[in-house]
């Protein structure tokens, strides 16, 4: 069993997060201690909040008085509610929180059932409960509980809070919103990326598209994200879905926060270190695009190439599934930019065609280009990726996947926008960590088109 202890300052946020899952029928309140119920024996968020209020009022100096604990049994352990309740009570007692108010939610939104416990770390007299060395104490207690209840030993590689086995969107299977929601929540929480294009590349391997939306409502500017299902050619299918109809955790504000934190973590931890030697070896060994992609995939790396209508590669994004990090090629280094791969694969096609012609005795036949060899209807974006990806392994420095990334405030006009408002601000997401090589290529093509237009007018 793995325990994760999160601390914060928003009781409301923690309660709403779990209650939303209750409202969506993917969680249940199975137990509580010193928490009020209504006359029908039911829980509501007002009475829950009131149950914690005296403890919080007694100590306003503690910066993070809210405890949000998750207890995660091994996937092979299927426990009844009574067992989970007994485990929750014993865990809280041994951790020193047995006399605190707490409420236990059982989450059933993924195959492995687990529980969340909301409590406070200040007692009724206003004293902060000692939490020194909590990590080691918690680990010792979970091992004791595993032995007592005959549970499978578990470590951090055995679980993930909200990271199920991801699959490509299957439009024919229906309930597209649920499919998209499950994937984008897990990917936003689990992976690091430093721009909207990198996030878009990550989603594309699961047949999901994302665009930034902006506008003005009642004199207020807003920005948001819109998700959509893609077919295997990268074309949108069905109706777009606003991120606000999924969750704030996959909206504009959450993405902006993720971009900033990812950039810092990538720089501090040198996360390009693993991917560089793998790319170098693949570039040396494979000049054929399909073989190159297959070699990367064997090493846990997906690649998304962006091509224009002429078949020229103008963007390359690499997704390291082991470190759960997305890199634009030019950010890794000049040797991994789009031009390098376009030249590599173009040369490869020419060499192969020339060899074939010589063997067939057709030395005078022209050498075909990469565009000539593309099959009709071939994907514009390379999506030769595994249909399923297990993202259940957690990373040491990964952010708390269970903590809401933004507050739960509502718009004062009652108008529900995507996530938040950014009045007067330009789009930061497209500029932050922009693909400069792709932008330069696009500007060049635009200038060429204008020159052709001017020449046509003179004629």
Image: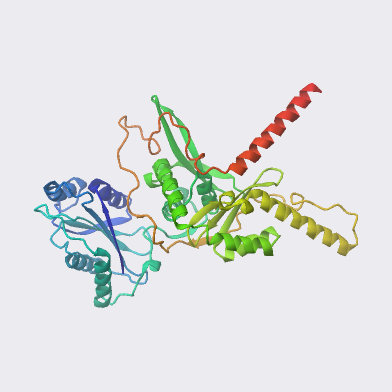
* Quarter of the rendering containing residue 290: bottom right
User: Going by the image, does 51 lie left or right of 146?
Assistant: left
Closer to the camera in the image, 138 or 108: 138
Question: Residue 373 location, x and y as percent?
Answer: 75, 53
Give 274 or 386, whichever is nearer the viewer: 274
Measured as percent of width and height from the top left, residue 428 is found at 47, 38
Q: How is this picture coloured?
A: rainbow
- Dividing the picture into quadrants, the one containing residue 441 is top right
| Quadrant (top left/top right/bottom left/bottom right) for the N terminus | bottom left
Q: Could you say which quadrant of the image residue 2 lies in?
A: bottom left
Q: Position of residue 389 (x, y in %)?
A: 50, 61
Observer-nearest of 35 and 442 = 442
- Left or right: residue 434 versus residue 27 is right
Image side of residue 297 versus residue 311, left or right: left
Q: Is residue 207 visible?
A: no
Q: Is 285 displayed left or right of 56 in the figure?
A: right
Please name the residue shown 63% across and 64% down the image: 281
Task: In the rendered view, tell whether residue 354 sits above or below residue 216.
Answer: below
Q: Quadrant of the C terminus?
A: top right
Residue at x 40% of width, y 62% of height: 394
Residue at the extreme left = 125
Q: Position of residue 361 (x, y in %)?
A: 91, 62
């Amino acid at each position: 069993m793995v325990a994760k202890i999160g601390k914060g300052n928003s009781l409301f946020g923690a309660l709403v997060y779990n209650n939303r899952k209750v409202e969506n029928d993917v969680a249940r309140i199975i137990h509580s201690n010193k928490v009020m119920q209504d006359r029908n024996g039911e829980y509501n968020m007002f009475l829950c909040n009131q149950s914690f209020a005296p403890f919080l009022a007694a100590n306003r100096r503690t910066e993070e008085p809210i405890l949000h604990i998750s207890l995660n049994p091994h996937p092979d352990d299927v426990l009844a509610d009574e067992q989970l309740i007994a485990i929750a009570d014993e865990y809280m007692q041994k951790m020193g929180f047995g006399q605190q108010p707490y409420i236990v939610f059982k989450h059933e939104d993924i195959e492995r059932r687990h529980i969340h416990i909301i409590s406070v770390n200040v007692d009724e007299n206003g004293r902060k409960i000692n939490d020194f060395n909590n990590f080691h104490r918690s680990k010792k207690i979970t091992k004791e509980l595993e032995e007592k209840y005959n549970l499978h030993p578990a470590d951090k590689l055995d679980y993930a809070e909200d990271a199920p086995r991801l699959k490509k969107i299957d439009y024919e299977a229906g309930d597209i919103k649920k499919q998209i929601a499950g994937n984008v929540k897990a990917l936003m929480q689990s992976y690091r990326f430093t721009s909207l294009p990198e996030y878009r590349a990550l989603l594309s391997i699961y047949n999901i598209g994302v665009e930034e939306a902006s506008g003005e409502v009642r004199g207020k500017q807003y920005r948001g994200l819109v998700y959509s299902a893609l077919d295997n050619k990268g074309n949108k299918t069905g109706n777009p879905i606003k991120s606000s109809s999924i969750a704030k955790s996959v909206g504009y504000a959450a993405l902006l926060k993720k971009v900033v934190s990812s950039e810092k973590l990538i720089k501090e931890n040198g996360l390009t270190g693993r991917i560089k030697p793998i790319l170098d070896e693949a570039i040396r060994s494979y000049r054929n695009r399909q073989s190159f992609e297959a070699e990367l995939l064997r090493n846990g790396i997906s690649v998304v190439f962006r091509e224009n209508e002429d078949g020229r590669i103008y963007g390359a994004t690499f997704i390291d599934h082991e470190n759960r990090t997305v890199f634009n090629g030019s950010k890794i280094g000049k040797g991994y930019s789009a031009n390098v791969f376009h030249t590599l694969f173009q040369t490869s096609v020419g060499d192969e065609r020339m060899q074939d012609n010589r063997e067939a005795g057709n030395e005078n036949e022209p050498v075909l280009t990469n565009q000539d060899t593309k099959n009709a209807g071939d994907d514009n974006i390379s999506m030769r990726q595994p249909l399923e990806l297990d993202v259940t392994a957690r990373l040491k420095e990964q952010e708390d996947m269970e903590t809401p990334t933004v507050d739960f405030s509502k718009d004062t006009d009652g108008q529900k926008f995507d996530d938040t408002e950014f009045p007067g601000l330009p789009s930061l997401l497209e500029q932050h960590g922009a693909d400069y090589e792709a932008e330069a290529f696009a500007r060049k093509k635009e200038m060429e088109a204008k020159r052709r237009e001017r020449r046509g007018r003179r004629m």
